[in-house]
Image: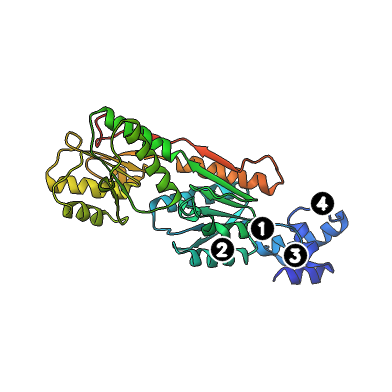
């Protein structure tokens, strides 16, 4: 039994059945009762697609992430889906990878599902924040549905960005380290994304404002792999740094393992700061001080904006920011 059968049995169009299912007021009471009686006798349960027929909504939002195995990404999807369900929306998840061509293909696949809006999770979708040609595919998608980007900013009509104050957060932490006499601060990152660039900008500004040089040998690009980070630091010879700022907690765990291998006392000889305040920060010994970018808050705010936009609210801000908080644990002494 499907929507076509119900329409035939009731002697109405499938669009009328869909309007009745969705509670639309564009159906007469007589027709509504006739359709409901048929549905009741047939024991029909409408699916999401059937509900969308005849209306300008599928009550479905596309969510795209580059890598669902990443703790930040999976947490964000968990919060997004839960919040969408509160508003009666379903979601379709797509994992795009990091290559631009793959991202474009996955967006087209989601658009083909007749989604009402698209949410892109992760600063990789914003590129470096400098080369706008790398984000043209997002502006093209925004011509069809509203697009919401979490942890990255892209300019364009019908595009809404939600970001954390990454630059300020890393600036403040770097200044704290310097205030405690740390002069050789290592910066470890695994990407050149919008978010990572913001974090590096905060790090560099704090050094300059403190009269310290910004040197290339204290900025290292690593894979997001705990053992790779540890081994990379071990292969660099004797440590020439007294603290480490990492762009995620996985990298910070690698830095802790390096210090352990070298017999360095944490935090007396080396301070380590992670990012995202994930479960990894408390799964390590010692537990890692980590910058909390408030994933749940930014996801809830994004969904609120999604609903407002879909309801026709023209006052929704195109760009909103969420402040970060340093959660101090055992790897810092300031």
Is 151 left or right of 307, judged from the image as shown?
A: left
Q: Residue at x 68, y 63 (%)?
A: 46
Which numbered circle lies on residue 107? Answer: 2
Residue to which mark 1 is pinned: 143
Image quadrant where one finds the N terminus: bottom right
Which numbered circle lies on residue 41? Answer: 3
Q: Residues within 10 Å of mark 4 (few under 14, many from 20)?
A: few
Which numbered circle lies on residue 25? Answer: 4
Judged by depth in the image, the label closer to the viewer, 4 or 1, is 1
Tell me, yes or no, whether the two marked residues, 4 and 2, touch with CB atoms within 8 Å: no
Q: Report how far apart the C-alphas of labels 2 and 1 lie in the structure.
A: 13 Å
Tell me, yes or no, whether the two marked residues, 2 and 1, touch with CB atoms within 8 Å: no
Is tag 4's residue or tag 1's residue first in the polypeptide sequence? 4
Residue 322 or residue 193, whichever sits in front = 193
Is 332 rendered above or below residue 312? above
Judged by depth in the image, the label closer to the viewer, 4 or 2, is 2
Q: How many marks?
A: 4
Q: Report how far apart the C-alphas of labels 4 and 2 lie in the structure.
A: 33 Å
Tell me, yes or no, whether the two marked residues, 4 and 3, touch with CB atoms within 8 Å: no
Q: Residue at x 76, y 68 (%)?
A: 6
Is 290 left or right of 256, judged from the image as shown?
A: right
Coordinates of residue 116 in the picture (x, y in percent): 65, 56
């Amino acid at each position: 039994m499907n929507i076509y059968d119900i329409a035939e049995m009731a002697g109405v169009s499938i669009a009328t059945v869909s309007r009745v299912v969705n509670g639309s007021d564009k159906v007469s009471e007589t027709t509504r009762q006739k359709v409901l009686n048929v549905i009741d006798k047939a024991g029909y349960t409408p699916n999401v697609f059937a509900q969308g027929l005849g209306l300008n909504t599928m009550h479905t939002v596309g969510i795209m992430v580059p890598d669902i195995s990443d703790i930040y990404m999976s947490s964000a999807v968990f919060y997004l889906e839960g919040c969408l369900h509160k508003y009666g929306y379903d979601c379709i998840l797509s994992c795009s990878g990091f290559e631009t061509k793959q991202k474009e293909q996955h967006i087209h696949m989601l658009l083909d599902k007749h989604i009402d809006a698209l949410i892109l999770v992760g600063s990789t979708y914003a590129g470096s924040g400098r080369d706008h040609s790398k984000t043209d595919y997002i502006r093209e998608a925004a011509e069809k549905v509203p697009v919401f980007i979490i942890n990255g900013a892209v300019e364009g009509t019908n595009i809404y960005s939600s970001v954390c104050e990454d630059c300020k957060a890393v600036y403040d932490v770097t200044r704290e380290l310097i205030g405690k006499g740390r002069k050789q601060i290592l910066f470890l990152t695994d990407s050149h994304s919008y978010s990572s660039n913001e974090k590096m900008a905060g790090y560099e500004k704090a050094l300059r404002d403190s009269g310290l040089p910004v040197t290339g040998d204290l900025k290292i690009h690593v894979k997001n792999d705990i053992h790779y980070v540890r081994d990379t630091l071990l292969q660099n010879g004797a440590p020439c740094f007294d603290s480490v700022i990492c762009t995620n907690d996985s990298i910070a765990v690698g830095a802790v393992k390096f210090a352990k291998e070298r017999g360095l006392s944490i935090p007396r000889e080396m301070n380590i700061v992670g990012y995202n305040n994930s479960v990894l920060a408390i799964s390590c010994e010692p537990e890692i001080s980590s910058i909390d970018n408030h994933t749940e808050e930014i996801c809830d705010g994004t969904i609120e904006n999604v609903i407002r936009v879909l309801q026709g609210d023209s006052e929704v801000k195109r760009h909103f920011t969420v402040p970060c908080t340093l959660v101090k644990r055992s790897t810092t002494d300031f």
